Amino acid sequence: DNLMEYINGERFDFVLFQELFKESTRDYIIEHTDTNHFKTIISRVDYNSFPEFIFQDAGLFMMSSYPRVDLADIEFEGGIKNSNGVIHMILDKEMSRSNDFLANKSVMGALFNVDKATKLFLFTTHVQALGTTEHKEIQLSQIKNFIDVSVEGVLKSGIVKSAEELVVVLAGDFNSNAYSEERFTRMQTLLGYPRDLHKEFHGEKQEH
């Protein structure tokens, strides 16, 4: 209750969750969302489950005050799936010593109209928690490729007229130690050296 009161009160432009596995939790959030402000809700992209109580999209969830652009008519390459105009891809997994690997890890993308001159391509992901560093790096490379192919697809389609009119943001649960300089630099390299907005604006906060 307090979380949804906070989210509705702050009137964010975008809110993203990961690990919304339970249908009841997902429904609760939707029911308590101020839809007068959050006009777009993307509650799930993959309707298959493995096993039946853990959903394959890793519980990825988006909502926004901005309208979503329908991507259903674009043919994306590289194994990207289109679900009602939102794109997603399941990442490779490996066996680990926790049940974390049972939930399929994935990346999801949705395009939003910010204003007449600007569109925002928003991506969210959840990578494997316990597993080898080498495998996490494979997942990061898959995410980078997913974003590259997605951006190329919307530019080729003409939905976005030029790269100058497109903002690309990646958020999510990277299950990585951001305060290990070696790990952080490696992650930045694999993702193509994006700006880290959290570190730019809150870098002094030692958060998990």
Image (cartoon, rainbow, N blue to C red):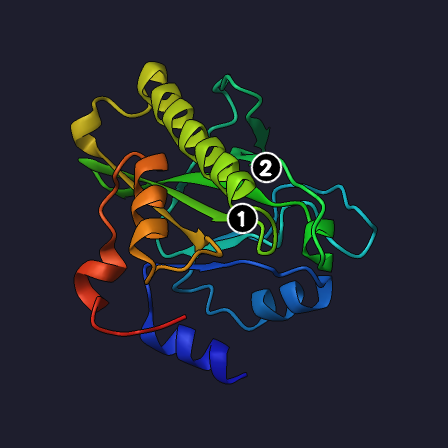
Q: First in sequence: mark 2 or mark 1?
A: 2
Is any atom of residue 169 visible in this view?
A: no
* Badge 2 element: loop
The image quarter containing residue 181 is: bottom left
| Label 1 crowd (10 A; few <14 / some 14-19 / many >=20) | many
Q: Is residue 200 left or right of residue 141?
A: left
Q: Which mark is residue 127?
A: 1
The quadrant of the picture occupied by the C terminus is bottom left
| Label 2 crowd (10 A; few <14 / some 14-19 / many >=20) | many
Q: Is residue 7 above or below residue 60?
A: below
Name the residue furthest right. Answer: 52
Contact? badges 2 and 1 (CB < 8 Å): yes
Q: What residue lies at 49% left-to-right and 19% top-to-bottom?
A: 76
| Amino acid type of the residue that numbered disc 1 sits on in the rendered structure | Val
Q: What residue lies at 33% left-to-right and 74% top-to-bottom?
A: 10
Where in the figure is residue 14, as x and y percent of width and height?
37, 57
| Amino acid type of the residue that numbered disc 2 sits on in the rendered structure | Leu
Q: Which mark is residue 38?
A: none
The quadrant of the picture occupied by the N terminus is bottom right
Q: Which mark is residue 91?
A: 2
Q: Is residue 17 left or right of residue 190?
A: right
Where in the figure is residue 124, as x and y percent of width and height?
45, 48
Give the Cα separation between the discs numbered 2 and 1. Answer: 8 Å
Q: Is residue 76 or residue 8 the one in the foreground?
A: 76
Q: Is residue 74 or residue 60 the one in the foreground?
A: 60
Q: How many marks?
A: 2
* Badge 1 element: loop
Q: Is residue 128 above or below residue 31?
A: above
Where in the figure is residue 98, as x and y percent of width and height?
71, 59
